[in-house]
Amino acid sequence: MNGSVVKYTIGRLMQVLAMLMLIPLLVGLIYRESLIDIRNFVIPIVLAFLLGFILMRSGSAKGHIFTKEAMFITASCWIIFSIIGAIPLYLTASNYPSFVDAFFEMMSGFTTCGASVASNVELLPNSIIFWRSFSHFIGGMGILVFTLAIMPKANKESSSLMQAEVPGPTFGKITPKLSQTARVLYLMYIALTVIVIILLLFGGMNLFDAIIHAMGTAGTGGFSNKAASIGYYNSRYIEIVLSIAMLAFGINFNIYYFSLIRSARQAFKSEELYWYLGIVATTALLIFFNIRSMYDSSFFTGVTSLFTVSSIITTTGYVSLDYGAWPLFSRHILIFLMFVGGCAGSTAGGIKVSRFVVLFKSALNQIRKALNPLRVSVNKMDGKRVDKEVEESINRYILVYIFLFIIFMLVITLETNNFESAFSAVATTFNNVGPGLIDFGPVTSFEAMSKLSKLTLTFAMLFGRLELYPMILLFSAGTYRNIRK
């Protein structure tokens, strides 16, 4: 592995972090927060800048970035961002008594998980509240995608970096130049976020609340500045706006690009998109009929069902009411949606709809072949044959996913004897959803967990966000052999 180019790249990313942390610092100045609250951001900004400077000076921009280097850089920078980003939270007087708590919260922010250990988020300074949600906005599209978007130039090997971070079974550029692809993605991302802010303002939110919840929606993260999350506003309008917005950010961004630049009809022929919308419609209707006797208004029940399904399948994690009190049938539908997640190439987490579609079609083909051994079955997506290599990579991914899930689950069961609590805690963090069920449900937090469990779930978030392999490589002993300076 080329250690020199790895150090230089990580150093550059540290300076990007220092630049990004100036924004919550500015928020603190705007709201005239105390010098202590301001200092809490100055310390990590200086630290990130100095670390970046040292790493860049000791490294070199010259060299190749192959898959191994890209995965190592990706996993390392996400951990470093979360550690340095946690410093302001740890130095804040309330909610984060240990650095493990602060680290958990910031990893949850950058990975857009939204799980929280904060006992009372409304006591936090506005700068910290903004930083938590801003981390969703950064992590949603990707730290490295942002860096590539602002780089003055990016060589062809930078695609390895982007491929290591962008979720989904396959990766493709939407423009010939990679840096231009990153800029286009971020421009669409920002434009959609601004639209959500405006719509929320029409719903009666103040500007700060609208920005916080729009960033959480865009990154499909789910941090709120209210203890009751979206339920605080008791507004069907806001719930409908956010339901549609969350679903929009769970769609592959390539579809938006091709619908604007090329043919909208061709862009919306995506098979994954129709499966995604079909799953949302089906599960929302099933939950509606299952819970309608619990509420007086059918309209309220319908909006609540759609909002909760949208929040869970896109792994946003916003809450309008305690769905932990719903019947077991509805709760298990929500657990299923945690695993499905959004579309590949979106800001949503989960395994991704495209993987489930390919697995489902592969299973059908195996059944047909068992019934008729002479039959030749071809797996297709969007009218094109799915390469055997892609099918095999999805199968391997699912096997590794299950293996890691079991390991995380075993650690969590050391602390709790409630299977549904433990299972949902791992499911919601590994798939970057946020709230789970029972002990870790929508009206509770992860505050009471032990430090071991918190660290386990912290890394579960990162494994899930980076789709396993970068983190496996980071913890592999073979990665550190034959490192060239």
Image: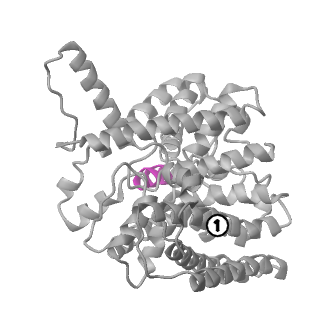
Percent x, y of residue 25: 69, 79
Q: Is residue 280 left or right of residue 177?
A: right
Please indicate whether residue 369 sits to the left or right of residue 445 in the image. Answer: left
Q: Residues within 10 Å of mark 1 (few under 14, many from 20)?
A: some
- Give me the residue at 25% from left, 48% from top: 270
* Residue 205 seen in the figure: no
- Residue of label 1: 80
- Which residue corresponds to the image point at 25% horizontal and 72% vertical from the top-left? 176
Q: Is residue 10 magenta?
A: no
Q: Which of 449 and 70 lies nearest the eye of the viewer?
A: 70
Magenta stretch, main secondary structure, is: helix
Seen at 41% across and 38% down, the residue is 396
Q: Nearer the viewer, residue 353 or 148?
A: 148
Q: Residue furthest front?
A: 482
Position of 308 with respect to 286 (left or right) is right
State which region is magenta: 240-249
- Counting from the top left corner in percent of width and height, residue 235 is at 58, 50
Eyeballing the image, is 39 above or below 96?
A: below
